Image (cartoon, rainbow, N blue to C red):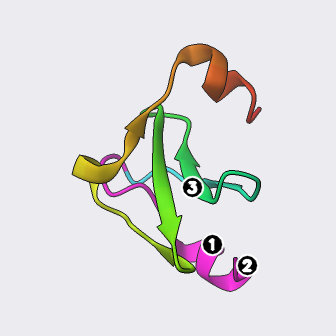
Amino acid sequence: MDTKLLSILVCPECQAPLVYDKENKRLICKADKLAYPIIDDVPRMLVEEAQRLTLEEVKHYD
């Protein structure tokens, strides 16, 4: 993922910065415990399409 793009993307729900999960191709919002998928190199920044994460999953990104 382009680092410049990653530096300006924020969570659409809370505007928190996102963490890039390269292995699973998704962007993580630790504040809201959401994972936004990246499909064909395009982040899908829709809350309705985001996956809810458990607290344990979120701690993995600290």
Question: Which sits earlier in the primary sequence, circle 2 or circle 3?
Answer: 2
Mark 3 vs mark 1, CA separation in Å: 9 Å
Q: Secondary structure at mark 3?
A: strand
Image quadrant holding the N terminus, namely: bottom right
Q: Is 59 part of what is drawn in magenta?
A: no
- The reply to whether discs 2 and 1 touch (Cβ–Cβ < 8 Å) is yes
- The reply to whether discs 2 and 3 touch (Cβ–Cβ < 8 Å) is no
Residue situated in front as seen by the camera: 5 or 44: 44
Please report the residue visible at 77 percent of the width from the left and 32 percent of the height from the top: 62
Does the image show residue 30?
A: yes
Q: Secondary structure at mark 2?
A: helix
Please report the residue visible at 64 percent of the width from the left and 15 percent of the height from the top: 56
Q: Residue furthest front?
A: 40
- The reply to whether discs 3 and 1 touch (Cβ–Cβ < 8 Å) is yes
User: Badge 1 is on which residue?
Assistant: 6
User: Badge 2 is on which residue?
Assistant: 3
Q: Which residues are magenta?
A: 1-14
